[in-house]
Image (cartoon, rainbow, N blue to C red):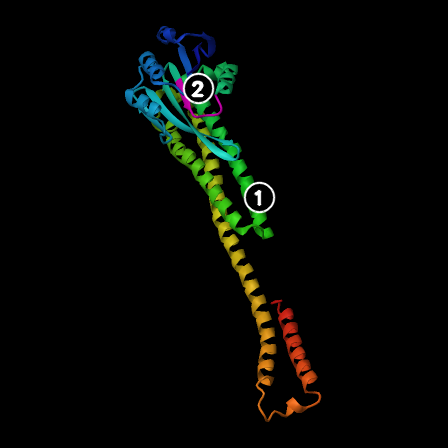
Amino acid sequence: MLINCVAYQEGKKLSDIPVEDISDYLAKPGCFVWVALRDADEAEMAKMQEEFGLHELAVEDAMRGHQRPKIEEYGESVFAVMHTVELKDGELAVGEVAVFVGPNYVLSARRDSLQGFLGVRARAEREPHLLKKGSGFVLYALMDAVVDRYFPVIEALEEELEQIEERIFRGRAQRENVEQLYDLKRKTLTLRHAVTPLLEAVGRLHGGRVPTLALKVQDYFRDVQDHLHRINGRLDTIRDTISIAIQVNLSLVTISEGEVTKRLASWAAIFAVFTAFAGLWGMNFEFMPELHWHYGYPVAVAIMVVVCGYLYYRFRKSGWL
């Protein structure tokens, strides 16, 4: 579906134009066309391919979807694929944005993305001195918007991790904690799959040999790469913390089980005293003088109570009870 199709000249918006007039504006000097599509069908992409002269392999990748984030060059044009990662009801929704960039055009086609890029267009139009740099700046603005949307996601993941850590040390729902940690690890990997390949790809847009359309905006792409480095570092921290949290959780479970085992062993030792004395005096042999002693029974009970009391005192003092 066509979202908008706008022509710009010298950094200023000329007008919204119909798709049929794209080729006319492409022929004008200092003019470029910015088209935005959402969930485009084959007919729309075929029309755009005809108007902009898009490479068939790039069009095929955009239509097929499920591409790894990347940046590819086709002559003077650049084809970029980025993943959008957004939170929806506590789960990560992953979309895809394919951007075709040439010397005088920008075509963005997003798929399965909850948020659009109208704000990016408005921002670019408010900065005509930057928009004057051409299609390369538009590619930067779109890429910067995608990357900036990663920050709220990673902040939510860090907050979720902190909450799980608090529950771990409160000793509550140990099994549930492990399940939530593995779910958080899955979310972290999802975001990493969007960030790491894009981090590698953006490096091709600044320093050394870069596409012609990116020459004037290399510093901006360096800034995007810096943001991606920061996000990647925070993801590494989350991953390491999750691994440590899982180990700590399992250690606490082991410690808790050890405490239970010590309590059971202590009580078993105490009751073993009763069992031993009762077994000894319950054998009923003929020559057991204490059986006929008037104070035999209370003395036997007193001995058992004293011994068991002493054991209880020792176990209590050592922290087993």
In screen coordinates, is 253 left or right of 314? left
Foreground pick, 182 / 292: 292
- Res 222 quadrant in image: top left
Q: Which residue lies at the image location 52% right of the left edge and 47% below the top edge?
A: 176
Earlier sequence position, callout 2 versus callout 1: 2
Q: Which residue lies at the image location 71% right of the left edge and 87% below the top edge?
A: 295
In screen coordinates, is 302 left or right of 122? right
Specify the amino acid type for callout 2.
Val
Image: magenta residue range: 107-116
State which quarter of the image contains the N terminus.
Answer: top left
Can residue 115 be found in the magenta stretch?
A: yes
Q: Dot 2 lies on which element?
A: helix
- Badge 2 crowding class, 10 Å Cα cut-off, few under 14, some 14 to 19, many 20 or more, is many
- Res 75 quadrant in image: top left
Residue at image mark 1: 163
In screen coordinates, is 84 left or right of 300? left
Relative image position of residue 301 (x, y in whole percent): 67, 81
Rendered position, 153 above or below 98: below
What numbered label is drawn on residue 138?
2
Can residue 153 be found in the magenta stretch?
A: no
Q: Is residue 44 in view from this perspective?
A: yes
Q: Which residue lies at the image location 56% right of the left edge and 59% below the top edge?
A: 256
